[in-house]
Image (cartoon, coloured by chain):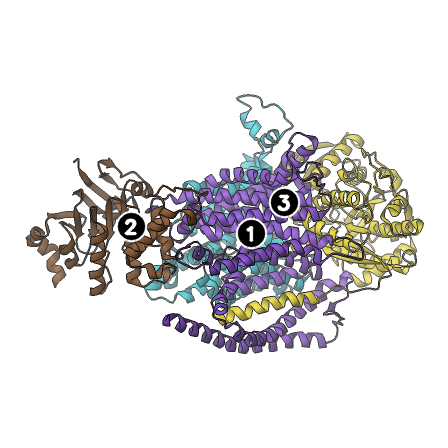
Chain colours: A purple, B cyan, C brown, D yellow
Amino acid sequence: MSDAARSIPMATPRRAGSAMTWLWVLGLVLAIALPWCFYDFAKARHSGFMISMFSQAGMMIIFALSYNMLMGQAGLLSFCHAVFFGFGGYVVIHALTGASNGSFPIPMELMPLAGGLAGLILAIIFGYMATKQRATAFAMITLGIGELMATAALMFQHFFGGEGGITSDRMIDRSLFGLSYAQSIEVYYLIVFWTMVSVIGMYFLTQTPLGRMANACRDNFERAQFVGYDPKIVRFIQFALSGLFAGMGGALYAIAYEIVTFDSMAGPLSANALLMAYIGGTTVFGGPILGAVLITVLQSGVSLLSNSWLVYVGVLFITMVTFVPEGLAGIIMAHGPIRKAGKLGKLAVPYVRILVPGFILVLGFVALVELVSFQTIGAAQGKKLVLFGNPIDIASNIPWAVAIGGLIIGGIWLRFESIVFGRVWDEITAELKRAEART
Amino acid sequence: MEIILVSLLNGLVYGMLLFMLASGLTLIFSMMGVLNFAHASIYMIGAYLAFEVSRWFGFLPALILAPILCGAIGAAIEIWGLRRVHHNGHIAELLFTFGLVFIVQRGVQMIWGMLPMPYRVPSYLDFPLFTLYGANFPAYRGFMLLISAGMLLAIWLLLKKTRVGLIIQAALTHPNMVSSLGHNVPMVFTGVFAGGCGLAGLAGVIGGNYLTTESSMADAMGPIVFVVVVFGGLGSLAGCFIASIIMGMIQTFAVVFDYTIADMFSPLFKVPEMDTLLGEILTVPMSRIGPLLPYALMILILLVRPRGLLGTRDT
Amino acid sequence: MSGQAVSLCDVRKNFGATEIIRGVTLNIAQGERHAIIGPNGAGKTTLFNLISGRFPITSGEIALNDTRIDTMPPHQINRMGLSRSFQITSIFHKLTVFENLRCGLLWSMGYRYSFWSPLWRQKALNEKAEFLMEDLNLASRANTPAGLLSYAEQRALEIGMTIAGGASVILLDEPTAGMSNTETDYAMDLIRRVTQGKTLLMVEHDMKVVFDLADTVTVLVYGQVIASGPPVTVRASRAVQEAYLGALEE
Amino acid sequence: MVRRLLSITTLALAASLGAACLGPAQAAEDTIKIGYVDPLSGAFAQQGDASLKHFAYLFERINAEGGALGKKFEIVPYDSKLQPAEALIALKSITDQNIPFIMHCAGSNVAAALIDGVSKHNARNPNNRVIYLNCGALASDLTNDQCDFWHFRFDANTGMRAETLVRSLPKTLQSVYLINQDYLFGQTLQKETKLYLAKLRPDIKIVGEELIPLGRVKDFSPYISKVKASGAQAMITGNWGPDLNLMMKTSVEAGLDLSYYTYLAHVVGGATSVGAMGENRLFTVTEFHPNVPSEQKSAAGEEFVAKWRASHDFDLFQMNNYALLKMLASAINKAGSTDAYKVALALEGQTVKDPMGHDYIMRKEDHQMLEPLYAAQFVKDVKYDSEKTGFGWKTVTAVEAADLAQPTTCKMKRPAS
């Protein structure tokens, strides 16, 4: 909604927009500075893990945003988005090999364009089929396409390399700036650059007649017909363009990992796009960015700590879907009017008050899950259960009692506090409404 | 001839297994519009519960208890989960079931461990029923056919002969109408979801020892069930049945008729042997792409007939 | 037939075995204000759906400015200069009022499926949308999502989107349904103002509106035209009174 | 509504914080760490789980034997989710901590990615190099055309297994049917089996061959009808998991009188799911099984197995990984440090012995370990049964490491320093 508001220069003052602009600039600065926060001065080198994770986050941002071009902006539920991502990756892997042996002499910096083009072409082909239908029929066609392509990638060795995938070397010695791309930090900045370009590009698209009509077809495809538009063509172009960006994301994947396997085309990645976009918030342009970062951190970070991370992800999704359908960005946007009215301070104490029981509840839950999974799985793997820095003896009753107690007490307490919080929230919004009515 | 008859029988058994899973999803999907990705997870829970029950009380109690438990789980999911999510739209419901898939998978691993369960066909069903062209037809397969046919009959009777059935049938095709007629739609929804999960549970009981009871069994069954439901058409149990049988037959016969695209062209001209992508595509035998045919068929039917085989409304 | 804005020739429509439109022949001249009335279930909205291309016809011919349109999809008919409103408000609920109107304008201003021209730079487009908003008295609600408007405002927006594209033939399906008296007066005024010089075809239940706005009235009963002519004549017709007006005034 | 959503968001935030508090045990610095990457979550978690359980036991053993350089070994597990990208991220994490060893067992796709990733990493970061210890990705290409100096495979490849299997086939056998899964490992096995059949047993006729889609076939009856029609006496298959179990079940139930020569029936869960129907019919090729020591009358071996069985309800079979740790320990001792390059050189040509006294040799030219293999039959009367089924493995044919020294096509590029 906010980006829609900003697109009407004469109707709204620019102030809201400029705050947004600053947020974007801040994001960019953060992206540039982030690797240096994890710089290991003792060994004078970067944290490869962190850079990998941030690089992954970068390509996932492109991927999730391009997915949201379908889901959030055009109301299309696709289950084959990874196909374009993966295909872009495969093409770039071949292009890298071609670039180093001279048959495809384009510099590294422009490789993402090759991936994007590949994604675009494939999306034109599949989009021609899928966009004939809408809603569930569209979703099911894409489900079929996704399955077909993932299996084809396993079956046809020449292009996809079967199970082992295709590898290449990114040190192709063709760069506009004379970079070798030996270090992942160089690749990271390449990713930051292309992520920025893609984000700007996709934002630009939302502000064009096509982008607007995609929204219109999402809200009411029949009405769109009666203002002269063919929703099928709107869907088709939107689908093709989202394939373009997904392909660019895939290209960055190929450059970062120098290998592309069928996994990058398969269902789980498509599902990931859906999760990232939804968790982040589909109604706000920047929402999927938050989702992409969060999910990447969960997958790469939390999975280091616990093999039960899938349970946490599952619980997170269920709570988000149940209680926060507008996603992370939706929540943040909900605070906008309160911030403008200068009443954010009033929420501080209620926030702290729900954070405490919330924390207890989560700790109880985490402890319980870890205890249970340790008992059946972890113990025999020779691990020692360490919860919150302390080794735990699972044979004794105390940790179990503490965990269950935390779960129950935290739950009841949180219920109580959330009612209190809701009251404060309602009061503030009611106040704002009254103030608005007066003006 | 021999191979065709045997394959027909095999295709029928497989189709019936698919139908057991898909019938529950057809009810849920057509009526509530919920893309229930957790349907196969319920099927897995059914298998694990059946193993646990049959260990203590025997197979027959499991056959009754496990589906009831699965139905209860389904009801709980609907009442405390889906109903709250419902007003956020179908994508929210879909994601909710996604979350469930993760939780169920790890949950099952946490409770029963990683190893497959020794859940076996009971000894009184473990004998050859008859011999066809020298190959035994196991009694358990006959039992599966019996159960699924019985299930088909029971659902049909329920839908055609009872008042509840009439409401459900009406809700399958015209969900909005039913609510405006003053029926308690949330109740009907809970009932249908529980019933669908119960059917999935039953499929788990039957399929768990026919196939293998392990924590990855849900993954393999997830998408194919959707294909059957969509291919058969929303709102049509008959369509779902026919689609299941078709899918069963296709997959069976794809293995038997082991041709490649190059073979098909061979009467016209000789396809040269090529070591390229095209050559690969032309020489993939049918049996290798057999499991993909359902997806291809689904895409085709959706392109020309978006309501599916016997569907009453567009997908 | 030439010179007619819209002409229908023996148009029929079946839904399954039942025939809803049973041979309608109707000619609407350029610039005419034509109202279609009839009891519930007479097929008025269905007739609109056939003309605007929402449903395919079973047999017969429909022409717009002497070009056959009965096989065209709705968006093509719209591009040829026929625009319609809906009985049940049909707008883009999540888009703002301003965006809704802009969407109504886009095709007619030649933007097509452009994904290279940013909307904020299109001065003519935005000015026209602003102007339209003033005209509809919705300027104060410019940034409100259409779904949050009041009913009357939504109806006004619906009319605004219908006329935004500059179509020469406007079909309005019960534009004043569910409105209070003052709202109806306002809506009539609005319709009269924005459809000046255009051909207007409307379905209406409110006889006050019909006799106030229309030059010609056609009465449709059970899918057939039983009378057509100037309001005074139609009002006087006995057949109409029996079939329709009598029943209505009970 | 709003109140709920906000409270739950904080909950979600707290969740990530809470999870952050969970950490792997911070052990003392004076251990030799080995990064271990395998699927530990998701549908394939049982593979990683089984290996981890083996390693828990083997690490304890090797540490009791003195570790290396007076330090103990420590395993640092990472979840690969069976995805190459995740494995490569784990590799970064491992090199960040200056851990010089990355170990990985499951999935030849991940292995191919890791060989490539490790090789590039070492070329680009010459002062922070790692050795890739492959403990179970078997596709023979990995030590042939794809071989790499930094990759050491501590398990018999598909070619060696195929040769062992073919050697164990009884003289009376005349016709076989090959069924394998349609992915890198299965395809390789199919190829190698055919190769060694032609080479060692030209009298055996291959009456049919089939590649089945991995994990997707729910009904094997059509395949079984084909097998029956072909008149085969035995089936040779590299299938594992449900693909093996279902295929056997369908075949046995259909009353086919076949022998099943498999490559992976011995792995965790195999015995449980096959059960009684495998009696006498099922054969496997394994690096070890619990009855090897008693068959060879080795007291040390007996002790090795008995201790495992006291605390595990599935079979110990990864003896190769014991050899892995032993070789690594002695190579580190020989090199005098954990520097990847020095250890890699020291590993080449290493020979160690298992508790029964068999040799394990790390071949220099392709970094493929030669190990003894056992072809075994699933029978009732054995000392140790598998997974409490009442059935266990009995050796049919044992092949020593030296006998399996198959030629390699590897042309290894060796770094100068």
Frontmost residue, D391 versus D270: D270
Subunit under mark 3:
A
Q: Nearer the viewer, mark 2 or mark 1?
A: 2
| Distance CA(mark 2)–CA(mark 1) | 36 Å
| Amino acid at the residue labelled 1 | Ala
Residue C126: image location, x then y, percent: 37, 50
Residue A168: image location, x then y, percent: 70, 38
Residue B202: image location, x then y, percent: 54, 58
Task: Name the residue carrying label 2.
Answer: C162
| Amino acid at the residue labelled 2 | Thr
Task: Name the residue carrying label 1.
Answer: A64
| Distance CA(mark 3)–CA(mark 2) | 46 Å
Q: How many marks?
A: 3
| Amino acid at the residue labelled 3 | Leu
Task: Name the residue carrying label 3.
Answer: A252
Q: Earlier in the sequence, mark 1 or mark 3?
A: 1
